[in-house]
Image (spheres, rainbow, N blue to C red):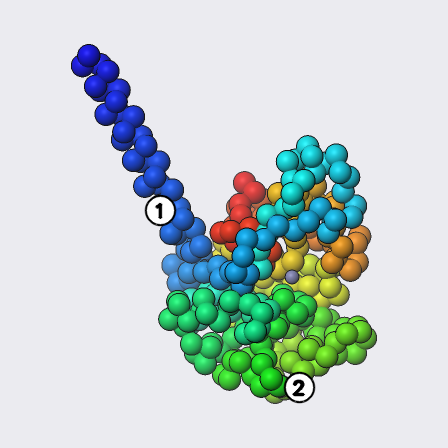
Amino acid sequence: MRQKLIITIARAFCILGFFALNGWAEDNSKILKVDDNTTAYWIQDNAQEMLNPPKLFGEASEALFTQLNLTQGVPASMGTFLLKADGEYILFDTGLGKERGQFFTQLAKLGVSPDSIKKIYITHMHLDHIGGLVSGGKKNFKNATLYISQVEFDAWTKELPNNDLQKEVAKVYKGNINLFKFGDTLPHQILAMDAAGHTPGHTVFQKGNLLIVGDLMHGYALQISHPEINSNYDKDKENSIKARRYFLDYAQKNKLTMGGMHFPAPGFQKNW
Ligand SMILES: [Zn+2]
């Protein structure tokens, strides 16, 4: 009888512990302590739950989706990262924009005004990453300097088609765009690395133990075990695979936490 009671009490504590731990994870997993001076926040731009459909990964077989239990689609999101570094808020990408995403509402909930942001690091110039920079031909971040890879900027402003938004960003932020080379260390000790493939100047940024991987992966649960599979959005297939393999290996070897713009909630993943 006494033993039964002890087991019951122990069970109750286990259940309580489980919920407490889950609650803790839920509240804190969107926030990552990068180092003593830096905290990273994942900001979700999509309002509804998001599954990327199997047809987005045209190179993968139906059998593989069945095997991985992903026939309904691969859990994903649209997101950006806000860092508080050296007492200052900085951004990595800006989401779809005021009309289409919830990024600005989420930013306000964190008590951060767009005017207080002085630096924005851009992984690449697709709509879901730079849409938030402008509204109606005007800057949404009055005091910000943009950091964009020279290769990416040149590709969109000179060669690539359907570049109205990219040209608008270039015009509106003229004089406040810093074009970097791969390998450069940018303000706040942020290292910009070559992840070309998805777009010509796609960039991965490292800050301490955080690796912002941009659009390296559109289906984490699929591509973590199959980095050789591209999404249909990846422009240069061969280099996309190369970059994915390289940075997954780099994150693992250096014990870095990855932040991906299309990772499922909570936006951060570790592969070690
Ligand atoms: Zn994207």
Task: Please state which amino acid type lies under the numbered disc 1.
Answer: Trp
Q: Position of residue 215 (x, y in %)?
A: 65, 58
Q: Position of residue 241 (x, y in %)?
A: 74, 50
Q: Which residue is mark 2?
A: 171
Residue at image point 74% right, 49% down: 55
Q: Position of residue 173 (x, y in %)?
A: 61, 84
On-image quarter of the N terminus:
top left
On-image quarter of the C terminus:
top right
Of 238 and 115, which appears nearest the observer? 115
The answer to which image quadrant residue 232 occupies is bottom right
Q: Is residue 193 above or below residue 55?
A: below
Task: Judge whether residue 188 can be spotted in this image.
Answer: no
The answer to which image quadrant residue 40 occupies is bottom left
Task: Judge whether residue 27 can be spotted in this image.
Answer: yes
Crowding around mark 2 (Cα neighbors within 10 Å: few <14, some 14 to 19, many 20+) is: few
Residue at image point 22% right, 20% down: 6
Q: Earlier in the sequence, mark 2 or mark 1?
A: 1
SS class of the residue under badge 2?
helix
SS class of the residue under badge 1?
helix
Q: Position of residue 116 (x, y in %)?
A: 43, 78
Q: Which residue is mark 1?
A: 24
Residue at image point 65% right, 45% down: 73
Task: Please state which amino acid type lies under the numbered disc 2.
Answer: Lys
Answer with left or right where residue 213 lies relative to residue 6. right
Answer with left or right where residue 74 lies relative to residue 208. right
Q: Quadrant of ligand 1?
A: bottom right
Residue at image point 77% right, 74% down: 162
Query: Marks 2/1: CA distance?
Result: 44 Å
Crowding around mark 1 (Cα neighbors within 10 Å: few <14, some 14 to 19, many 20+) is: few
Dots 2 and 1: beta carbons under 8 Å? no
Answer with left or right where residue 58 lies relative to residue 272. right
